[in-house]
Amino acid sequence: MTTGNQQSKVPSHILGYPRIGDKRQTKFALEHYWKGKKDKATTQAALAEVFTTNIQDQIDAGLDVITTGDFAHYDLVLSQAVAFGVQPLRFAGAQTLDTFDRQFYFARGRDHTSQYEDTAAWQMTKWFDTNYHYLVPELEADEDFSNTDFTQVFKQVSDAKAIIKNSGKTDKALKVVLVGPVSFLYLASSKLEDKLDHLDKLLPVYADLLNQLGEQGVDWVQMDEPILSLDLEGRWQQAFERAYNGLQQTPPQIIVANYFDSLGNNCNIACNLPVSGIHIDITRSSQPKQYVTQVIDHLPSHKLLSIGVVDGRSVWTTDQARAQEILLEANERLNTPHSYTNGNQPKAADGSINERLWVGTGSSLLHLPVDLTSEDVPENLKGKLAFAKQKLSEVVVCAKLATGDLQPDSAATDISLTPTQSAAQSRDGIFKDRYAKQQAKLNLPLLPTTTIGSFPQTAEIRKARCQWNNGELSDSDYQDAMKAEIRQCVVDQEELGLDVLVHGEAERTDMVEYFAQYLDGFWLAKNGWVQSYGTRCVRPPIVVGDISRPNAMTVDWITYAQSLTNKPMKGMLTGPVTILNWSFAPSDAETRDILRLQIAEAINQEVSDLQDAGIGIIQIDEPAFREGLPLKQAEQAHYWQQAVDSFKHSASCAQPETQIHTHMCYSSFHDCLHHISAMDADVITIETARSGLQLLDAFKVDSNIDGADGSTNTEDNYQQGYQNAIGPGVYDIHSPRAPDSDNMQIVIDEAQKYIPIERLWINPDCGLKTRNWEEVRQQLRNMVEMTEIVRKKYAA
Ligand code: GLN
Ligand code: ZN
């Protein structure tokens, strides 16, 4: 064993890889399977092909540790819950389905094998501060995790081993990814008051799984514990030691992986867990060098540290010089030889290896598009971008930088911005005065009805867009096709008797992508797909420089729609916070603040143009308003301030008579209502139907608002809950079912108890683009019918 750090090799690995395939093969295979167009064997063969590529790509890139187990068919948390035998009561009988089919039944609420009834799907929630959604495991109070079935992960292990063997690279170590027990419980929902009470029954299942993985020759298990990035309560902190004390065993060796932020207050706990090593993500740290030093200071001298230097959520290449500076020092400090007792270690050709340092990606590469190779990258961006596949080689390079075997050949490729000097503006006037003027001008009835913006994206619309993109349809033919859609949409809304109409968003593929196409400062990768949930993929635009608006983006469509009707036409825009959160942009707060404000200025210009064109209502959607909230509490106040300011800036040119709407969905409002209030939109439409009125609950009592005098909620400031107008979604658009008007009325009957009737609106809870016209007409007919009833009921 050589100990000179110049010669010792530093092993390289990744934390996970996209499973959608470079051509979204997984998506198409599964969707065909669910529709019965493909049988199980063919489907699984298609998935196996993507799996093989994922392993082979890692081998070909030269990674030392090959990672598997993360190839979930829908979601990793879900796969693991299914493997642990979790099965909520309403899915009774579903254990007759194999784990492959059962996971889809849980995720979709629909058994595609048609043996079991449709029922509510598992809830989906954002995975930390990403735009990926995981499935929330539902644990019964007496959950005993007894019906385990590890076939899926074992198959990945044996398949990966075969691929490694075939490649002749037998010196590779094999690592399996699992969601660690503490994060698993933290992210689950449970009928028990204290979820940690499940730990005693959960740990033996992990122990059993680890044992069997060891027997299969797995060298390492990466236990993902991303909750270590949060400010955890003491009892959750303590759970870590308890959990890992129960899992100490080799083989396999355990590496506890944290990502998306630094360990913060959990540093000591993580470093002292009874495991072989820990992984940290330094790509989200403002002071990565100090962070690494701090961790090494805390880390017992026999433990391994994996440093994530390659950002798993950035499409830019790694700053090699900066990475080397950190890694050289870490290698020096950690280069004390240590003999592992068990398991296959990655080995250098000459047998020398630093057994205490690994180099990796910060987080899983799941959050990146798969491959840049076939993209038409603009000249000025060439050599600066890296998608998942390119990041594999970057990790290998960084591992060599750590030993000094390689010198950095790239500098920072981050974007450089010219911040504008001007501060964020707010609009004039207070809500009460504005709203009175608006309602007088718009001449709206009590309880006005409207929709959230989109109407069905029909096959014809998609076909026209496809032909236009392929050059088969001229610009003007495409515009005519879209105008025909808009016209039909307006006619339909008039027939239905809605009060405030929309143009229907036929021309938009996606509410962020559409604007990114028109704004300067964005680049869109043709095949830049990223998994959002299940088989659903999104294509986040990439911020490449200062953002500005060279031309109007929506005015022609909206004014055309307005020309077709005497009713008010609502202009439809996406807000700055959402555009930024759903794009690839630098992760540091300072840069994000600049970009958000630049987008806000662009939206503000659009608001101004719409207003000048005679549009009296403008909606600025912010469904992702809460999503960019930093994981650490200390940084949250700043985020809220910036998010609110940028939204306000985007609406700041609106005259008092111009009514500004906003829309939010999938948000939990309980902890942020005062920020939502501070946005000062005249009308907010929210999702209430699916969450069983719980959301509405937040709008009636805002427990976060202290009285102006510092007192807590009194009868007086109780009234202050939400001051502006609000449209609680009266039905769930995610379901094809049309609830009858009685059902929708429940929402209004409840809402009017807390919000004066003059400030209530009636609308669905989100856009209608995923529904078909038949469903939409029926649903809206019921909604209008209900409106007539409540108008009579509540008219003064
Ligand atoms: N206006 C958008 C639509 O109706 C809003 C979508 C959303 O909230 N995600 O589709
Ligand atoms: Zn919505």
Image: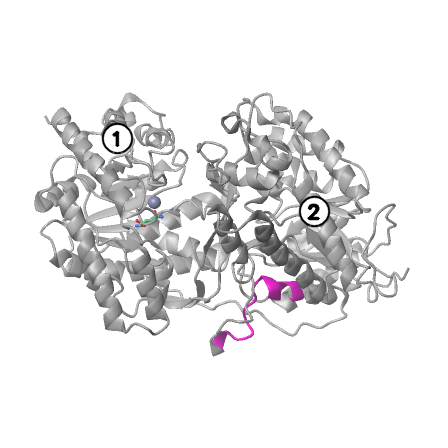
Residue that badge 2 annotates: 155
Outermost residue to the bottom: 379
Any mark on residue 740, and which?
A: 1
Q: For this rendering, which residue is in front, 749 or 458?
A: 458
Task: Say what secondary structure mark 1 lies in.
Answer: loop
Q: Which residue is located at x 40 percent, y 48 percent? A: 624
Direction from residue 614 to residue 410 in the image, left or right: right
Height in image: 763 above or below 570? above
Q: Residue 380, position in %: x, y?
A: 48, 77
Residue at image point 16% right, 55% down: 615
Residue 207 % position (x, y): 74, 34
Question: Relative to 758, is 409 above or below?
Answer: below
Q: What stretch is highlighted in magenta?
A: 380-393
Name the residue type under label 2.
Answer: Lys
Q: How many marks?
A: 2
Q: Is residue 726 above or below residue 318?
A: above
Q: Can residue 423 be seen in this view?
A: no
Q: Is mark 2 on a helix, strand or loop?
A: helix
- For the question of whether residue 247 can be seen, the reply is yes
Crowd rating for badge 2 (residues with CA inside 10 Å; few <14, some 14–19, many 20+): few
The disc label shown at residue 408, or none: none
What residue type is disc 1 on?
Asp
Q: Which of marks 1 and 2 is nearer the N terminus?
A: 2
The part of the image, by quadrant, that contains residue 282 is bottom right
Q: In which quarter of the image is the N terminus?
A: bottom right
